[in-house]
C-alpha cells in the first residue's frame, strides 16, 4: 500500500517538475494572441471599448488582464463569442442589445461643424462645412464615436426597424 | 378574425400522422409472434422473465422521466419495447434479479444518462445484455431444454414462480437435470476440444435444422424461432418502419464468410444455414441492429453498418471467446454510427456526375 | 430521340398527403363583387421591388401602371381596377414576419374600366420573340404557381443556351388547391394559345403539359384542346399524365420525372435546356400578348374544413383575404389556422386583413383536426425524412446543425439545395418542425454573410480613411517643410524672424 502511494507520488512529482521546467525553458516572448485577437476585432479603432483602438484592446485582454471580452459594441455578441472561443473562456453577458442601432443626425439642429465627420472611423457621415450632415445608415457601425464630438448634441442612436427584408425566422421553440 | 386567434407556424401545415408511440407499437406487434412462441416453447418461466423485465424497464422509465421532468412518461412505449427486447435476449429461466438489474441498466445507463430517447449511442437492450453477460456469465449461459407450456415436462406456474424468485422449484428440487447447451455453445466447446462440426452437433442433444427453424432448441427466449422472427421483420419492412438495408446486409455479412469457410473446410466450419437459424442472428438483424436511434439514417450507412454487424458476428462466433457474437457485434457497430452517417450522405439532387 | 424520356422516371422520396381536392374541385370559377378598397403591394414578385409611379389622388384606369419594374429581375405592378389612389402607405402583407410593406390603396370607382389604350396583338406569331417578351414583361406577368419569378426572364434564354423543351407545370400537387385544374377545365383553349405564344417566344417546338392523374376532367379538356388547337400547327404539344406524388409540382422534380435529367445544383432548368412555366402563367401570357392586359387578377382556391363555402374565385390583386373569406360565407368556428397557398408550402397568416397578391394560389381555413401542430419531440433518427426527401438530403442532420447553431456545418450538408417542400416534416414521427429549422438556418446564414460583408467593407473603409489621413498628414508635413525652407530662405535673405511657426500651427488647426 505504502509502496503504491510512494511510487505514484514520486511519479507525480517527477511529472510536475518536468512540466515546470518545460514551461520555463520553452517560454516564448511576445504574444501571438494579441495578433489573433486584433484580427477578430472590427479594426475600426472606434475606442468604444474604452481603449484607444482595437489593438490596444486586444493587448489589454491578452496581457493586461482585461477580463471583460464584451466591450466591443460594433463587433457585438458575435465577435465576443469568437474571442471567447479563441481564449477558451466563457462568453460574457453583453450589455442588453436592443437590436441594431445606428447614429442619426437631427438635421434641423445640425450646425455643419464637421466634427462628427472627422470622428467617424468609417466615413459614414456625409456633409460639408456649414451644411447639415447626415449618416449613411447602411455604413454606420453604431460605434458612437460621433456622438461625443458634436457640439450641439444633435446625434442620437436610433434603432434600425425590422422590415420584411431584414426579418429572420426565429429558432423553433422546443416545448419540454 | 382577430390576429391573435390564428395559429402561426412554418409550413407544412399538414402532417402524415406518424408518431413515436405508433412506431413502438408496431415493433412490439411485430415481436409478438416470436414472443408468444417463446412462451409456448419455454413455458411459464419465460413469461415471468418477460413480465418482470418489461415492468422493471417501464418503472425505471417512469421514475427517470419524473426526475428529469420530461413530458409523457410512458406514452412513447419505447421503454416497454426495450424491456421486451431485453427479455428476449435472456435465458428463459433467468433469476428475477437478473431481469430487474437488466431492466434498470437498459433504461438508466443505456438511455437516460445519454439524454433520453434519441440520444443514446448504444442499443439499450443490447448494452444491458452485454453488461449482464460479462457480469453474471453463469446466469446468462444457463440454458434449459425447452419443455413447453403444457407438455408433460412443462413446469407448473407455481414451480416457475418459485424457480425464478428463489432458484429452486416449489418442492425444493433443483433444476440441473434438464439444462442443456445451445447449438452454438456445443459447437464452440467442441471446436475448442478439436472435434469436428459433425461430432459437435451430434451426441446427446443432436442438432436438427427443422427444430431450430421452428424454435425448439435451447437458447435465450428470442433466439429460437427464426420463422416467427422473420415474419415480424418482414412486417416491419412492409410497414416502412425499418428499411431492408440493415437486415439484408447483416445476413450477407455473416452468411458470405460462413459459406466461404464451409466450402473450404466443412469439418471445421458449420454450414451457413446453421449460422442463420441458430443463435440471435435473425433476432439481431431484424430487431436489434435496426433500432432506429442507434443505426445510421443513410442507405449506404445502413448497408455498411449491417455488413459490419454480420461480419463481426461471424468472427466472434468462429474465433472469439464467446459462442455467440450478435450482441457484441451490434454494440460495437453502434459506436461507428455517427461516423457512418457523416461520411455516407447520399448524392444530392443535381450533384450526380451525370449532370456535370 | 428527344429530351423527353420515353418512360416516366421517378424522383427520390416524396409523400402522399391526402388530396382533399373534392372540397372545391366541382366549384366553377366565379367572380366576386368589387371590394370597397384594394391594397396593392409594390413588391409581389421575386427580385427587386417595383418603384411607385403614382401619387395620392391619381385617378387610374384598370391596367394603369402603379409601380415600374426595378432593375434586373423585377416586375411592374398595375391597377387592378379603375379608381382613385387614396393612400400610398405601409400595410400588413402576407409575409411570415407579419410586417408591413409599401402598398397603394386604391378605391374602386365601380366601373372596372380597362384603359382604352391597352391594345393587344392579333397575330403574336408575326412578332419578334423579343417583342413578345417585352409585352410579357410590361404586363407584370410572374410565375403564378407561387414562386412569383418574373416570367419574361424565363422566356429570355441566354444566347448560348438552346431551349429543347417547354414544360408546362399543371401538376398542382399541393393538396386542396384546385385553381389550376378548374382553369384547365374552363379555359383549355386559352391555355393552349398561351403555350403557343410561349413556344414562339422561346423559339422552340417541344412542349409537355404535366398533369397528375387525379384531375381526369382537366386532362380530358387539355387533350381535346391540344388536338383542336395545336394539330397541324407549328409545335409539338403533348399532355403527359403523371401518377400522383408530392412534390411532383416542384420544378426540379417535374423535370426529373419528364426528362430523367436533373437540374444541376445551384443551376437553372435552362442549363439542361428546359423552361418550366405554370399553366396559369400561360393564360396570363396570352392575355398580356393578345389583349395587352397586365396581370391584375388571379384564380384563388378558397377551401379547407374551416370555410363555409369552398370556391374557386377569380380575385383582383389587392383584394383583402378578409373580403374573399367573407364572400365565401366566413370562417366556421373551430378554424385555427388560415394558410395562403397550399398546405405543404403555403404561408400561415398572422391575420387575414392582408391582400391577395400574384402568388396567392389559395386561402385555406384549416381546423384543428386537419392541421399539424403537435409539440416537437427528440429526433429518434428513424430516417423517414431521409427516405422522403426529394433532393436526397439528410434532413435530420440538417435540423440538428440548425438546432445547435452549427451554421457552418449547414453549408456542408447542402442546406441551400433544400426546396422547403415539407416532405420531411410531413413524415416525421417526432413532429420536428424541420422546414422551420431550415428557414431559420438559411436566414441566419444569409444575415451572417451580410454582416460579415459589412464588417469587411468597414475594415476597408477604415483602411482607406487611415490612408487618406496619412496622405493628408504627409501633405501637411511637406507643406511645413516647404514653408520652413521658404522661411529659411527669407531669413537668409532678410535676416529677420517671421511668424512662420504660428502660420503652420494655424494651418494645422484648420485641418
Image: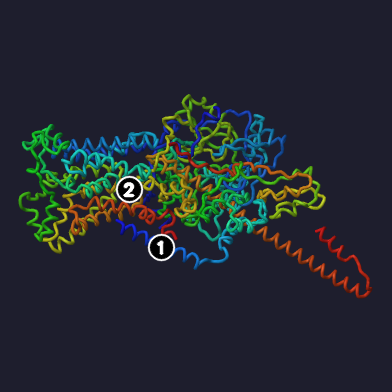
> Residue under circle 2?
B294
Tell me which chain the residue with mark 1 is part of: A
**Residue B151, picture quadrant:** top left
Q: Residue furthest front?
A: A2
From what the image shows, is residue A53 above or below residue A107? below
Quick check: C173 left or right of A101? Answer: left
Of C500 and C285, nearer the camera is C500
Q: Residue furthest bottom?
A: C492
From what the image shows, is residue B192 above or below residue A135? below
Q: Could you say where residue C153 lies in the image, as x and y percent from the top left? A: 57, 51
**Residue C261 visible (yes or no):** yes
Mark 2: which secondary structure?
A: loop
- Residue at 16% across / 41% down in the picture? B92
**Residue C291 visible (yes or no):** no
Mark 1: which secondary structure?
A: helix
> Residue under circle 1?
A15
Q: Could you say where residue B15 lies in the image, as x and y percent from the top left? A: 41, 37
Of B337 and C292, nearer the camera is B337
Q: Could you say where residue B260 lies in the image, as x and y percent from the top left? A: 18, 61
Q: Which mark is residue C503?
A: none
Q: Could you say where residue B315 lies in the image, as x and y percent from the top left? A: 22, 58
From what the image shows, is residue C34 above or below residue C68? above
Are there few (<14), some (14-19), or many (20+) residues within 10 Å of tag 2?
Answer: many
Amino acid at each position: 500500500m505504502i509502496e503504491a502511494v510512494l511510487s505514484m507520488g514520486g511519479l507525480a512529482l517527477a511529472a510536475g517538475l518536468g512540466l515546470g521546467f518545460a514551461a520555463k525553458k520553452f517560454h516564448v516572448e511576445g504574444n501571438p494572441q494579441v495578433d489573433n485577437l486584433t484580427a477578430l476585432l472590427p479594426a475600426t479603432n472606434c475606442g468604444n471599448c474604452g481603449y484607444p483602438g482595437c489593438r490596444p484592446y486586444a493587448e489589454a485582454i491578452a496581457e493586461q488582464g482585461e477580463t471583460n471580452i464584451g466591450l466591443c459594441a460594433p463587433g457585438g455578441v458575435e465577435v465576443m463569442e469568437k474571442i471567447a472561443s479563441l481564449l477558451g473562456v466563457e462568453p460574457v453577458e453583453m450589455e442588453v442589445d436592443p437590436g441594431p442601432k445606428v447614429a442619426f443626425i437631427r438635421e434641423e439642429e445640425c450646425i455643419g461643424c464637421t466634427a462628427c465627420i472627422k470622428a467617424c472611423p468609417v466615413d459614414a457621415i456625409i456633409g460639408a462645412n456649414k451644411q447639415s450632415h447626415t449618416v449613411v445608415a447602411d455604413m454606420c457601425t453604431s460605434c458612437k464615436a460621433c456622438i461625443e464630438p458634436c457640439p450641439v448634441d444633435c446625434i442620437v442612436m436610433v434603432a434600425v426597424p425590422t422590415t420584411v427584408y431584414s426579418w429572420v425566422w426565429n429558432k423553433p421553440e422546443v416545448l419540454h | 378574425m382577430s390576429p391573435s386567434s390564428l395559429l402561426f407556424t412554418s409550413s407544412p401545415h399538414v402532417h402524415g400522422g406518424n408518431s413515436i408511440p405508433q412506431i413502438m407499437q408496431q415493433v412490439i406487434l411485430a415481436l409478438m409472434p416470436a414472443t408468444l412462441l417463446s412462451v409456448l416453447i419455454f413455458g411459464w418461466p419465460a413469461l415471468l422473465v418477460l413480465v418482470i423485465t418489461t415492468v422493471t424497464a417501464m418503472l425505471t422509465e417512469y421514475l427517470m422521466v419524473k426526475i428529469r421532468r420530461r413530458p409523457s412518461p410512458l406514452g412513447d412505449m419505447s421503454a416497454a419495447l426495450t424491456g421486451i427486447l431485453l427479455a428476449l435476449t435472456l435465458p428463459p429461466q433467468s433469476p428475477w434479479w437478473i431481469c430487474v438489474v437488466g431492466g434498470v441498466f437498459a433504461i438508466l445507463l443505456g438511455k437516460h444518462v445519454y439524454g433520453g430517447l434519441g440520444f443514446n449511442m448504444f442499443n439499450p437492450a443490447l448494452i444491458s445484455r452485454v453488461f449482464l453477460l460479462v457480469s453474471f456469465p453463469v446466469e446468462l449461459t444457463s440454458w434449459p431444454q425447452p419443455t413447453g407450456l403444457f407438455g408433460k415436462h412443462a413446469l407448473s406456474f407455481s414451480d416457475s414462480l418459485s424457480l425464478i424468485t428463489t432458484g429452486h422449484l416449489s418442492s425444493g428440487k433443483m433444476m440441473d437435470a434438464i439444462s442443456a447447451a445451445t447449438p452454438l455453445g456445443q459447437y464452440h466447446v467442441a471446436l475448442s476440444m478439436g472435434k469436428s462440426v459433425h461430432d459437435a452437433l451430434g451426441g446427446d442433444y443432436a442438432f436438427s435444422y427443422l427444430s431450430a427453424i421452428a424454435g425448439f432448441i435451447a437458447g435465450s427466449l428470442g433466439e429460437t424461432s427464426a420463422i416467427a422472427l422473420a415474419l415480424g421483420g418482414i412486417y416491419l419492412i412492409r410497414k416502412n418502419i425499418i428499411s431492408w438495408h440493415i437486415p439484408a446486409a447483416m445476413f450477407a455479412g455473416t452468411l458470405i464468410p460462413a459459406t466461404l469457410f464451409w466450402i473450404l473446410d466443412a469439418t471445421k466450419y458449420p454450414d451457413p444455414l446453421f449460422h442463420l437459424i441458430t443463435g440471435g442472428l435473425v433476432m439481431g438483424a431484424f430487431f436489434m441492429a435496426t433500432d432506429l436511434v442507434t443505426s445510421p439514417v443513410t442507405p449506404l450507412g445502413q448497408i455498411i453498418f449491417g455488413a459490419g454487424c454480420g461480419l463481426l458476428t461471424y468472427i466472434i462466433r468462429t474465433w472469439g471467446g464467446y459462442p455467440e457474437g450478435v450482441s457484441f457485434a451490434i454494440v460495437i457497430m453502434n459506436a461507428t454510427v455517427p461516423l457512418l452517417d457523416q461520411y455516407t450522405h447520399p448524392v444530392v439532387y443535381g450533384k450526380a456526375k451525370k449532370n456535370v | 430521340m428527344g429530351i423527353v424520356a420515353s418512360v416516366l422516371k421517378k424522383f427520390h422520396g416524396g409523400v402522399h398527403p391526402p388530396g382533399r381536392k373534392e372540397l372545391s374541385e366541382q366549384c366553377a370559377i366565379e367572380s366576386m363583387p368589387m371590394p370597397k378598397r384594394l391594397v396593392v403591394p409594390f413588391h409581389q414578385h421575386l427580385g427587386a421591388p417595383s418603384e411607385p409611379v403614382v401619387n395620392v389622388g391619381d385617378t387610374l384606369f384598370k391596367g394603369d401602371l402603379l409601380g415600374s419594374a426595378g432593375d434586373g429581375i423585377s416586375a411592374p405592378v398595375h391597377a387592378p381596377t379603375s379608381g382613385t389612389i387614396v393612400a400610398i402607405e405601409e400595410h400588413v402583407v402576407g409575409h411570415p414576419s407579419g410586417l408591413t410593406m409599401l402598398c397603394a390603396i386604391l378605391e374602386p370607382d365601380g366601373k372596372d374600366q380597362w384603359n382604352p389604350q391597352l391594345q393587344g396583338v392579333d397575330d403574336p406569331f408575326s412578332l419578334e420573340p423579343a417583342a413578345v417578351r417585352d409585352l410579357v414583361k410590361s404586363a407584370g406577368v410572374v410565375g403564378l404557381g407561387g414562386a412569383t419569378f418574373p416570367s419574361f426572364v424565363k422566356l429570355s434564354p441566354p444566347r448560348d443556351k438552346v431551349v429543347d423543351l417547354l414544360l408546362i407545370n399543371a401538376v398542382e400537387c399541393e393538396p386542396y388547391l384546385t385553381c389550376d385544374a378548374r382553369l384547365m377545365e374552363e379555359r383549355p383553349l386559352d391555355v393552349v394559345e398561351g403555350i403557343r405564344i410561349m413556344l414562339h417566344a422561346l423559339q422552340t417546338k417541344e412542349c409537355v403539359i404535366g398533369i397528375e392523374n387525379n384531375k381526369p376532367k382537366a386532362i380530358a379538356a387539355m387533350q381535346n384542346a391540344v388536338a383542336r388547337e395545336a394539330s397541324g400547327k407549328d409545335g409539338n404539344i403533348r399532355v403527359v399524365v403523371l401518377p400522383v406524388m408530392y412534390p411532383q409540382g416542384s420544378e426540379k422534380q417535374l423535370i426529373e420525372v419528364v426528362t430523367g435529367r436533373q437540374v444541376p445544383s445551384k443551376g437553372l432548368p435552362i442549363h439542361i435546356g428546359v423552361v418550366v412555366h405554370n399553366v396559369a402563367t400561360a393564360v396570363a401570357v396570352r392575355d398580356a400578348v393578345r389583349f395587352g392586359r397586365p396581370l391584375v387578377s388571379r384564380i384563388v382556391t378558397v377551401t379547407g374544413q374551416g370555410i363555409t363555402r369552398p370556391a374557386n374565385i377569380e380575385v383582383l390583386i389587392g383584394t383583402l383575404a378578409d373580403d374573399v373569406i367573407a364572400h365565401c360565407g366566413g370562417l366556421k368556428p373551430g378554424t385555427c389556422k388560415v394558410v395562403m397557398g397550399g398546405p405543404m408550402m403555403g404561408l400561415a397568416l398572422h391575420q387575414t386583413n392582408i391582400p391577395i397578391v400574384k402568388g396567392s394560389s389559395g386561402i385555406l381555413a384549416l381546423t384543428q383536426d386537419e392541421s399539424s401542430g403537435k409539440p416537437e419531440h427528440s429526433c429518434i433518427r428513424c430516417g423517414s425524412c431521409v427516405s422522403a426527401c426529394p433532393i436526397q438530403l439528410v434532413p435530420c442532420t440538417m435540423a440538428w446543425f440548425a438546432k445547435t447553431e452549427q451554421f457552418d456545418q449547414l453549408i456542408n450538408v447542402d442546406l441551400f439545395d433544400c426546396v422547403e417542400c415539407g416532405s420531411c416534416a410531413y413524415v416525421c414521427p417526432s413532429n420536428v418542425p424541420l422546414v422551420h429549422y431550415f428557414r431559420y438556418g438559411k436566414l441566419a446564414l444569409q444575415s451572417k454573410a451580410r454582416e460579415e460583408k459589412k464588417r469587411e467593407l468597414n475594415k476597408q473603409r477604415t483602411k482607406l480613411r487611415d490612408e487618406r489621413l496619412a496622405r493628408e498628414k504627409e501633405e501637411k508635413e511637406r507643406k511645413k517643410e516647404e514653408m520652413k525652407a521658404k522661411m529659411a530662405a527669407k531669413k537668409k535673405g532678410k535676416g529677420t524672424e517671421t511668424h512662420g511657426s504660428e502660420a503652420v500651427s494655424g494651418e494645422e488647426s484648420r485641418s
